[in-house]
Amino acid sequence: MEGIPIRHLASEALGTGFLVATVVGSGIMAERLTDDVALQLLCNALPTGAVLVVLITTLGPDSGAHFNPAVTLAFLI
């Protein structure tokens, strides 16, 4: 890990954590909000998309904005 700054790894970890929290949280919210599956999908997709835009805009220049540990590890190899 000599060539990889800790800041890049921290940005990836932070972005991944926020993305997972958003997907899980909006999924739970959607389940409790309505029984309509289409509305549940919309209630999950909109916050996920919005958070992705924010994360890519803010953390993308620093980390590359993979937000997927498998992709990040593939780039390291």
Image: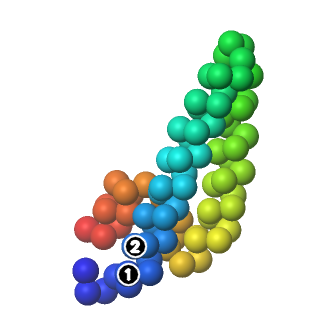
Q: Nearer the viewer, residue 7 or 74?
A: 7
Whether residue 38 is visible: no
Q: Is residue 5 positioned above or below 77 on the image?
A: below
| Residue under the point 50% across and 47% down | 20
Q: Amino acid at mark 2?
A: Leu
Judge left or right: residue 42 versus residue 61: right
Judge left or right: residue 62 versus residue 35: left
Q: Position of residue 47 (x, y in %)?
A: 70, 44
Q: Which residue is mark 1?
A: 6
Q: Position of residue 56 (x, y in %)?
A: 62, 64
- Label 1 crowd bin: few (<14), some (14–19), many (20+), radius 10 Å: few
What element does badge 1 sit on?
A: helix
Q: Which quadrant of the structure image shows residue 43? A: top right
Whether residue 30 is visible: yes
What element does badge 2 sit on?
A: helix
Q: Position of residue 68 (x, y in %)?
A: 43, 55
- Label 2 crowd bin: few (<14), some (14–19), many (20+), radius 10 Å: some
Q: Quadrant of the N terminus?
A: bottom left
Q: Which quadrant of the structure image shows residue 8? A: bottom left
Q: Are marks 2 and 1 in contact (CB under 8 Å)?
A: yes
Q: How many marks?
A: 2
Instruction: Give me the disc on residue 9.
Output: 2
| Residue under the point 59% across and 31% down | 27
Q: Position of residue 15 (x, y in %)?
A: 52, 61
Q: Amino acid at mark 1?
A: Ile
Alpha carbon of mark 2 to alpha carbon of mark 1: how far?
Answer: 5 Å
Q: Residue furthest front?
A: 32
| Residue under the point 43% across and 64% down | 13
